[in-house]
Image (tube, rainbow, N blue to C red):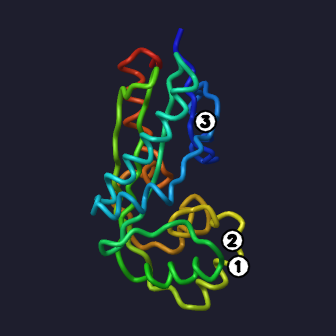
Amino acid sequence: MPQKIVLASGSEIRAKLLAQAAIPHEVIPARIDEEMITAALRAEAAKPRDIADTLAEMKARKVSEKHPGALVLGCDQVLEHRGEMLHKPRDRDEAIAQLYQLRGDRHSLLSAAVLYEDGEPLWRHVGQVRLRMRDASDAYIKDYVERNWDSIRYAVGCYKLEEEGVRLFSQIEGDYFHVLGMPFLELLNYLTLRGDLTT
């Protein structure tokens, strides 16, 4: 009998991806201090890729320790722009400022996933996608944030490609699932090899 996955994330889109792929799962968000952990890693000059991987692992490990026998999936996503990491906006003004910073330029999204079982890591992957944002006008960006604030307030980069945010971009290089915050095909491949999924 395949194991049910425990998703150690409150992300609606990650849960939706699992549901749409008919993968049994339960959502138990991990409670970790992401800001403190990120700040400590950045103080040690950790690369954005390593920060995403570490945060995903800490989420998976924390939930795994409390749910023995479960297959726990931890995920995290970071945005890198010219060597700087951007975070979820605190308010509308910060969202607008971030979009002003990103427009007309390239940035990368790094999406990490780590699977744990009984407090031990089984599998991990960090996917990267590169995006080029259009040089949108000040007025469009302000209106975009106002129209979409309830949806994008928890999105790194202040956009969702599955919604109006796709209009902000002229080019995307990489896997669409990485944009959504999970290296999903790589996860499905691993679960299939393990025998948890049949095709």
Which amino acid lies under the numbered mark 2 shown in the image of this protein?
Trp
Residue located 68% across and 63% down the image: 151
Q: Which residue is mark 3?
A: 20
Instruction: Classify the position of the N terminus by image quarter.
Output: top right
Which amino acid lies under the numbered mark 3 shown in the image of this protein?
Gln
Q: Element under label 3?
A: helix
Q: On the image, which quarter does residue 184 sit in?
A: top left
Q: Position of residue 166 (x, y in %)?
A: 53, 67
Q: Out of 184 and 166, give the one closest to the viewer.
A: 184
Q: On the image, which quarter does residue 192 sit in?
A: top left
Q: Position of residue 34 (x, y in %)?
A: 51, 54
70 to 112, vertically: above or below:
above
3 to 49, vertically: above or below:
above
Mark before the other along the chain sequence, 1 or 3:
3
Q: Which residue is mark 1?
A: 146
- CA–CA distance between discs 2 and 1? 5 Å
180 to 132, vertically: above or below:
above
Mark before the other along the chain sequence, 3 or 2:
3
54 to 159, vertically: above or below:
above
Q: Element under label 1?
A: helix
Residue located 65% across and 75% down the image: 91
- CA–CA distance between discs 1 and 3? 30 Å
Q: Which residue is mark 2?
A: 149
- CA–CA distance between discs 3 and 2? 25 Å
How many other residues sit within 10 Å of disc 1, few (<14), some (14-19) or many (≥20)? some
